Image (cartoon, grey):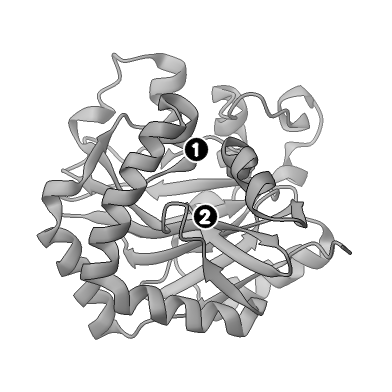
Amino acid sequence: METVLLDFNRVPILDKEDTERVFQELLDLRNIWLARTNWHPALEIAGPDSDIEKYVHYYTVGATMYMDARDRGWELYKKLQKMYNRVLWKRLGWLYDTFLEEIQKELGPCEYDEGLGLPGFHIYEFEDAPDSRKHHRCLHYDGQWWWGKKYFQKKYVDVDYKNQLSYTFTIKSPHNGSAIALWDLKPKQGRKASEIQQRYYHPIIERYQTLAYVQEIKKAKAIEDPWKFNLFDDDGDLGKYIPYIIPHLEGHSFWYYGMTMHQMILGDSFKEGDHRITFQGHGLKCDGKWRLFW
């Protein structure tokens, strides 16, 4: 099978009314939110004494291959998958149908793999932040399929492991904005990212797409193992590493090639009641069709 590497794009999925409907439905499903430890450089590097856990609360809804299967085993992942898939289809089936319809316009034939977890939700709840520090995850690539490789090998004949699809669909963003940062883009990709920024401008671009932010990331060595990135070994001009910041827009999905170096931007200056909620998932092209999962 010929491999044509993915690019990236932003696509509208829901209008304001339906996006709010999803948000309210998730609030009603609070009893199945699964609390997670914050993945945050201040915790990963500085340790548990950080105060971030006091005002940033992180949850997921859905079975996650890269946390549940990786950290707790395939059997637990399958148990969570069956439970969450049943509830999510019942309560939000219309959302999954709408997303599938719209994403196929961009990517061609897609379907949810019924043996894997449906795309699910990252949920961050915030209280008042004590200062204006920037909140972000470490730089990383997506390789979630690795934790289900035996499943894909058994079920499908032709699997394109080199071309993982990733997507993040914004349901709710904090009042001061949130985003995804794309690092180390090629010139053509950079031009496309700039076009998206101009079309969907948000001030968060100016706060994070800076040399000072690169210096902050380098100082913190904010990159997930086992990935390596020459930013942290480079003593020269760090300006060439300034990332492209793609602002979140409620109701819109951003899809991209998962092996693009990227980073979650949670935001800053949070207020009580702020949320950052995204519909998250991945896909592999198996036997000629994108199979979507989480």
- Residue 62 visible within the image: no
Instruction: Report x, y in % for residue 257.
Output: 68, 58
Q: Earlier in the sequence, mark 1 or mark 2?
A: 1
Q: Amino acid at mark 2?
A: Ile
Residue at image x 16%, y 43%?
127
In the rendered image of this protein, does residue 47 appear above or below residue 96? above
Mark-to-mark CA distance, 1 and 2? 19 Å
Res 80 quadrant in image: top left
Instruction: Report x, y in % for residue 67.
Output: 44, 34
Residue at image x 83%, y 62%?
187
Q: Which residue in the protein does label 1 denote?
A: 66
Q: Is residue 158 left or right of residue 29?
A: right
Quick one: quadrant of the N terminus? bottom right
Q: Residues within 10 Å of mark 2 (few under 14, many from 20)?
A: many
In the rendered image of this protein, does residue 240 appear above or below residue 279? above
Instruction: Report x, y in % for residue 243.
Output: 65, 50
User: Mark 1 near mark 2, Cβ–Cβ under 8 Å?
Assistant: no
Instruction: Report x, y in % for residue 128.
Output: 16, 43
Q: Amino acid at mark 1?
A: Tyr
Q: Which mark is residue 180?
A: 2
